[in-house]
Image (tube, rainbow, N blue to C red):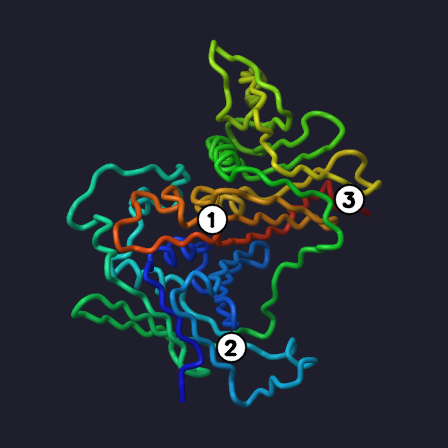
Amino acid sequence: MPPLFTGVSNNAHHLYTLLSCIGFASRATVQITPDRLQFSVEEGRVIQGVAILQKSLFTSYTFNVDNNQDTTDQDDHDEIEYPHFVVSLTSLLETLKIFGINDLSDSNGARDTSLPQTNPASSAFNAPSLLMDRSCTLQYIEHGAPLSIIISEPGVQTTCELVTYEPEDHESEIPLQRDAIIMKIIMRSAWLHNAIAELDSSTPPILKLSASAKEKPYFALSGTGGPFSESTVEFSIDHHNEIVGGATQTEHAVQTHKVAVNDGSSRARATRTKLAPTVAETFLVSPPSSMGDRIRQSYRFALIRKAARAMAVANKVCIRGDQQGVLSLQFMIDLDDPSSAPGRSVGAGVKSHPDPCFIDFRFVPFVDDEDAERDV
C-alpha cells in the first residue's frame, strides 16, 4: 500500500523559512490535502499562525486518498476528512537545522526583529553550494504513523521520524468574518516591520490601530502603556513627493512619528515624507455607523511581535479587520527573492520557486475594562 503522502523538495531551506515564521508555538496541527500541506499553530486562543505549503512548492507531491473514503460522489467530496495530526514544530525545525538547513539570522536571538540583511561572508559551512544536489522528503505513510523527514544527498540519506499525535477535539481557527470585513490594506511588509520595530523600542504592552478613509491620520499604529514612552507611527497614503534635507524620500513609509514622554514633558519629531507610489496598494476602510468614521482597535503587542519574523521575510502584507475586531495579517513571501532567505543566495543547481507562498496570522482584539463598560 503506497504512503498517504509524499512530498519532495529540492530546496528544504524554503520549508524552513516558511515554518520558522510560525515557530512561536511548540506544536503544530498538520493537514494534508491534494493541493497543499498546512501547518497551523495557536497560543491561548488569542493568536493563530498558519503556514501553507502549496503543492507547487514541491518538485514531487503525491497524495493518496484513504481507500476507506468514497470520493465518487461529487456532493460528498467537500466532506472528505483529510489526514490531520499534531507534530512537534520545534523538533521539525531543529531537525532541519541539524541537517544543515540553518537560518543564519537565528544567531541574533529569538526576539531579533531586524530586517534580513545579505551576509557577504561565506565559508565552507554556509556556502549556498552545500544545498546543491540535496533533497528533502516529507512522508506520512498511514494514519497514526510518524512524520518522516528524509534528507538525501549523493551517497548519504538521513531519516528522522517525528511522533504524531491526535488533534484535540476543541481545536478551531480564530474566525474572520469574511462577509463583514471593514478594513483591507495591502502594503510592503518591510514598512509594517519597520514600524513595529520602532514602536517596540518603548516596550509597549498594547498596540493600537487607527484607520480612516476620510481624515488624517488615515492609518496609524501606536504603542501605548509602556513604562518609558508612547509612540505613534502614521502612514502616508498619497502620491506626492516632498523634498527633505535636499533628497527625495521614497523609501520610508512613515509620514509623521510623534513621541510623548511619560514624565509630563513632550517632544515631537516629524519626518514628513509623502510617497510615490502610495504606501498602500489597496486602502479600503468602511467602518459601520456605530464606529463613526474611524476604526480603532487594540491588540497585545507581545502577540503582534510574534509575527515579526514573517514581516521581515515577506514581500507584502494584507491587513484585514472585521466588525468583531479580529485582525488578520496575511504575508506574501516570494521565495525567488534572495531577501526572503537571510544570509543566503540561490546557488547553481538549486531551483528557485517562482510562486509566492502565504503565512496568515490572526489576532483576537484586546478589550480593557473601559471598553467593556462602554459596550454595555
**Which residue shows up at 70% across the image and 25% down it?**
216
Residue under numbered circle 3:
373
Mark in the foreground, 3 or 2: 2
Number of other residues with Cα within 10 Å of mark 2, as a class: few under 14, some 14 to 19, many 20 or more: some
User: Hey, what amino acid is under mark 2?
Assistant: Pro
> In this picture, is 18 found above or below 242?
below
Q: Secondary structure at mark 1?
A: strand
Residue under numbered circle 1:
333
Report the side of 129 relative to 277 (left or right).
left
Structural distance between the alpha carbons of marks 2 and 1: 26 Å
User: Hey, what amino acid is under mark 1?
Assistant: Ile
Report the side of 123 relative to 37 (left or right).
left
Q: Position of residue 375 (x, y in %)?
A: 79, 45
**Hey, which residue is sitting farthest right in the picture?**
289
**Which residue shows up at 33% across the image and 70% down it?**
149
Structural distance between the alpha carbons of marks 3 and 1: 41 Å
Which of the two residues, 269 or 20, is positioned nearer the viewer here?
20
Which of the two residues, 369 or 202, is positioned nearer the viewer here?
202
> In this picture, is 337 found above or below 97?
above
**Which residue shows up at 75% across the image and 34% down it?**
294
Report the side of 19 relative to 126 (left or right).
right
Q: Earlier in the sequence, mark 3 or mark 1?
A: 1
Q: Position of residue 219 (x, y in %)?
A: 65, 32
Mark in the foreground, 2 or 1: 1
Q: Earlier in the sequence, mark 2 or mark 1?
A: 2
Residue under numbered circle 2:
83
